[in-house]
Image: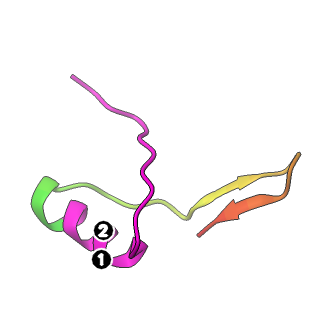
Amino acid sequence: MYIEHIAMYVNDLEKTREFFIKYFDTVSNEGYHNKKTEFRIE
């Protein structure tokens, strides 16, 4: 199985990111930017 993208609402984004990198051997990209709405997550 291959999961390309998930979305979660969390209180501490950096701690959650570190958790997934450490325990699930994942990688993190540069962030998300919706040019139409200017919504950005980094």
Question: How would you rate the neighbour count of disc 1 (Cα within 10 Å): few for under 14, some for 14-19, many for 20 or more?
Answer: few
The image quadrant that residue 15 belongs to is bottom left
Query: Looking at the image, is 4 positioned above or below residue 11?
Result: above
- Residue 15 marker: 1
x%, y% of residue 24?
Answer: 15, 53
Answer yes or no: do the residues labelled 1 and 2 have beta carbons within 8 Å? yes
Tell which of 3 and 7 is nearer to you: 7
Amino acid bearing label 1 = Lys
Query: Looking at the image, is 19 positioned above or below residue 5?
Result: below
Residue to which mark 2 is pinned: 16
x%, y% of residue 28?
Answer: 39, 61
x%, y% of residue 12?
Answer: 38, 76
For mark 1, give the secondary structure: helix
Task: Name the residue rendered at 28%, 27% in the picture.
Answer: 2
On screen, residue 15 versus residue 24, left or right, reads right
Residue 3, magenta (yes or no) = yes
On screen, residue 25 versus residue 26, left or right, reads left
Task: Name the residue rendered at 42%, 51% in the picture.
Answer: 8
